[in-house]
Amino acid sequence: MAFVDFASREIHCKIVYYGPGLGGKTKNLQFLHERTCPSRRGQLISLATETERTLFFDFLPLDIGSLRGFRIRLHLYSVPGQVFYDAARRALLCGVDGIVFVADSQAARLPANVESIRNLEKNLRHAGYDLATIPYVLQLNKRDLPSAMPAGELSRQLSIKGEPTLEAAATTGAGVFETLKAIAREVLLDLRRRR
Amino acid sequence: MSPADLVLFEEDFRRLQQVLRKLRVESDASVVLLVDKNGQRIASVGDVEALDMTALASLTAGNVAATDGLARILGEREFSVLLHEGEKENIHVSIVARRVILVVIFSNRSSLGLVRLRVRQAAAELDGAFREIAERMEREPVLHSGIEPLLTEITDEDIDRLFSE
């Protein structure tokens, strides 16, 4: 749920990066943090294990500019991808405004992608949302790897409702800002639609 | 408008700030803040420049979410109070009005007993304030939807411009 603060004229939106483990969710946030002017972003917080696997969440607040006199502030979260951290994923979906699904393009990870989308659907339902209606963007990550499946084929397998689909390589930053723009657009258009 | 949406008007904000200010003085705390369970900061008073309040809000909400999970495992509805004790600084976290997190940061200059007492009093006032906000949202949806003209007028160009600033 977007939080509209008339006192400071700000709209806050919560966006969650979801997907299978080691798919590049944290890398997306790290790249956005590195390449955003410090005055427009907060601290990147990572609650991770000693081996840098996300344990609870990563969090990055970003200010993307003004819209009709209101500052738009995005709160970006990435969930832990590993299967056994399901309770953390459920907790983070509370109050979500939009989802970026970060798919791992490697052919061997296709089953993990599919399972993660099913898990997302179930956890969204648990939190009172419907994947069919919530703002949603599919990112095909790791396009730079030789083992990546053809984008068209992967998209056919993973797309669920004709959502915006973007190719990316989060380690180099390709497609990362484009993905953020796409989800911000979906979230803001959804706010307009819901009125 | 989704029933879960929270729209805060200036008079609500002033009222909440007033309760927080009183709590800060009476409990001798350095910072008092209100955070939505989703991690959004609603209001804060005190030495807020010294701390990263956005991070504090997000981590507190994460902390409360994790504790809610623990409560469910034990068959409790919630653990309504959390306390973190440091060598010099302490954090008292409590749930008010079922959906909002009240955070009090205090040093050893104050005492846990005092903070608990004052938090209980402030929680009653905050309960009342949030109940009235909810009732007004029910009763006067038109007033509540003051954001509507802004949002219905958003154009695709507005959104494109956002990232080019």
Image (cartoon, coloured by chain):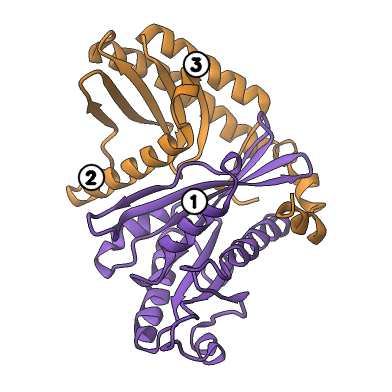
Letter of the chain that mark 1 sits on in the rendering: A
Residue B99 in sight in this render: no
| Residue A167 sits above or below residue B165 on the image | below
Q: Quadrant of residue B29?
A: top left
- Judged from the image, the secondary structure of the residue bearing numbered disc 1 is loop
Q: Which chain is displayed in purple in the rendered image?
A: A
| Residue A9 sits above or below residue A63 on the image | above
- Asked if badges 2 and 3 are on one and the same chain, I answer yes
Amino acid of disc 2? Ala
For this view, does A122 lie left or right of residue B66? Answer: right
Q: Position of residue B1 (x, y in %)?
A: 66, 50
- Judged from the image, the secondary structure of the residue bearing numbered disc 2 is helix
- Asked if badges 2 and 1 are on one and the same chain, I answer no
Amino acid of disc 1? Gly
**Labels 2 & 3 near each other (Cβ < 8 A):** no
Marks 2/3: CA–CA distance: 29 Å
Residue name at image x 68 percent, y 55 percent: A191
Q: Nearer the viewer, residue A85 or B119?
A: A85
| Residue A163 sits above or below residue A88 on the image | below
Give the number of the disc on residue A95: 1
Q: Earlier in the sequence, mark 2 or mark 3?
A: 3
Q: Which residue is mark 2?
A: B71
Marks 2/1: CA–CA distance: 20 Å
For this view, does A74 lie left or right of residue A92? Answer: right
